[in-house]
Image (cartoon, helix red, strand yellow):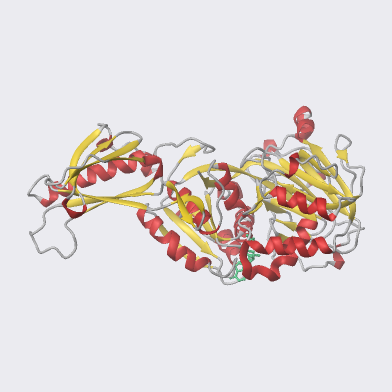
Amino acid sequence: MDSETLEPDPAAAALPMRGEFSGDARVRYALVLTESELTVQNLGTGRRKSGAVTVLDLQDCIGCRAYGAEDGAEDGADTSAGFAVYFYPVKRRWAGLSSAPGRRRVERRFRVAVSPDPRTNLEEAQRWAGAIRQGSFRRSGGVCAEVRRPRRFLVLINPQSGKGQAQALFNTHVQHMLQEADITYTLQITERQNHARELVREADLSQWDAVVIMSGDGLLFEVVNGLMEREDWEKAIQMPLGVLPGGSGNALAASIHYYSGSQSVSGEELLVSCGFMLCKGLVSHMDLTSVCMASSPRLFSFLSLAWGFVADVDIESEKYRHVGAARFTMGTLVRLASLRVYKGKLAYLPAEESQSTPSQAQSTVSFTDGSNSSSVHSHMSRNLNCQNHLLHNSCNSNNAHKPNWTGESPVTTRGPTDSLLVPLDQPVPAHWTVVKEEDFVLVMAVYQSHLAEDLIAAPASRLKDGIIHLIYVKAGISRRALLRLFLAMEKGAHLSTNCPFVVYVKVRALRLEPFSPKGTITVDGEVVEYGPVQAQIYGSLARIIAG
Ligand SMILES: Nc1ncnc2c1ncn2[C@@H]1O[C@H](COP(=O)(O)OP(=O)(O)OP(=O)(O)O)[C@@H](O)[C@H]1O
């Protein structure tokens, strides 16, 4: 991993730095660089005085580049050098009567002419550029566990995601940001489903510092599972991941933006925000959930497991993909008109319960194939990740939708042993809670805040809280109340509406057994095998670039 940028830069040691430079139209500027800010005082042009002071926060800076004499200058005519600084502060942009906050690009250029020698000028420009970069790397706090600045990215773009504009959006909004942040990248446009999954499963990952997806959540789901299918999964899943919203849901991108404490944005504003976080390169841990079905290989999920109303809307609204994020609103209205009840059995291990019975319930990582044999639990043979246990009463033969994620590819499922789960054909452990109702409108288990750009399903969720936020709605709720619930969810207020049909519990593991022979279950928005399913969360198993 590249840690070059963490080494102290000797040039940055002597802060504050002060200097006088010229800018555009011969305006002179006095600069003061401290650990946290670049203060720019406009000195005017000599004839016209000015005293205007601008303070630029280095937290908003993604890069600084030194350069020699301007292109096109005649040999020897211009001995000056310069440096360009790139900031993305949050500003409001007025559109009609409303204003939307978002990060806006601000580029400042300063010319250095301290000597007739071009080399001396360039060295001075480099000294300033190095010091500004160093300042911009410093930890900005928040959710981030550590400061790193990946330099070489693998960027995967799904050209089919969202409205089919992911590649164009990358070119117009992200490419220049990566250049400004001095990040190089290998671009791979995916050609088909599972392309990204196979690529990361086979690739030599040491050539990159991060794997970034420009797509919806589906492509990241491929990447996470591709990494977990590797023999070296334990190391591979430590690869920092990055998300750039290019799909229609973009739930993880919206969650990461939300955790940064910034005001809610969508569309291109969200893309610039995520691009900014990517350039800052702050890496945090992220929970993953292991999902076991009756006959498909185990999957790893970073976002959600859904059944009932939400899963149906997600899949049925695929046909409105051309309208982007509005597809979920359209899907919700259509499904409300034909609201139905989903019958099944739900059981879970409450989060507090799992803490009080550590011997059985710790979600620590133990290894099925690694050298850490001492941590392989004695009950591993009984568990064996549950994925190989076929159920006699499995109802997966009659799927309403063809699952995208079945056992088609002959890969070995790897990863930690699911120590909280027992095989699907055995009853759940006695200390689990079995929900007495068996008629539901929806069941969703979410481990990040957002289900889509404008749906805050679990406002209390955090990247690495180690918690599955289980929300279910019991049958009997009226259409109107359900609509109110979804409208409240846009602000994350649905859990405080005191609706008697809504239940919210924090859990570490769960099992769902639908009774009906047909239906849809989604994991991270992808259709998986329909039938009994169970899941357990692993705190901080993956890593993600967040802000
Ligand atoms: N080149 C491709 N052609 C067709 N499908 C692809 C391609 N690349 C990836 N896929 C698949 O497309 C599906 C949808 O992708 P993705 O989730 O990224 O976009 P989306 O559905 O628009 O966004 P969201 O999941 O946020 O709603 C995923 O199942 C992914 O595996």
Residue positioned 51% across, 52% down in the render? 100
Query: On screen, 241 above or below 261?
Result: below
Between 245 and 31, the one nearer to me in the picture = 31
The location of residue 238, given as percent across then percent down, is: 55, 46
The location of residue 372, given as percent across then percent down, is: 64, 39
Q: Quadrant of residue 58?
A: top left
| Number of numbered labels in the structure image | 0
Asked if residue 418 shows in the view, the reply is no
Q: Residue furthest top?
A: 356
Between 402 and 203, the one nearer to me in the picture = 402
Q: For this view, does 38 lie left or right of residue 89?
A: left
The location of residue 74, given as percent across then percent down, is: 10, 64
Residue positioned 80% across, 39% down in the render? 498
Between 213 and 90, the one nearer to me in the picture = 90
Q: For this view, does 124 lie left or right of residue 279?
A: left
Q: For this view, does 148 lie left or right of residue 462?
A: left
Asked if residue 114 shows in the view, the reply is yes
Q: Quadrant of residue 541?
A: top right
The location of residue 292, given as percent across then percent down, is: 77, 52
Residue positioned 13% across, 50% down in the render? 119
Quadrant location, ligand no. 1: bottom right
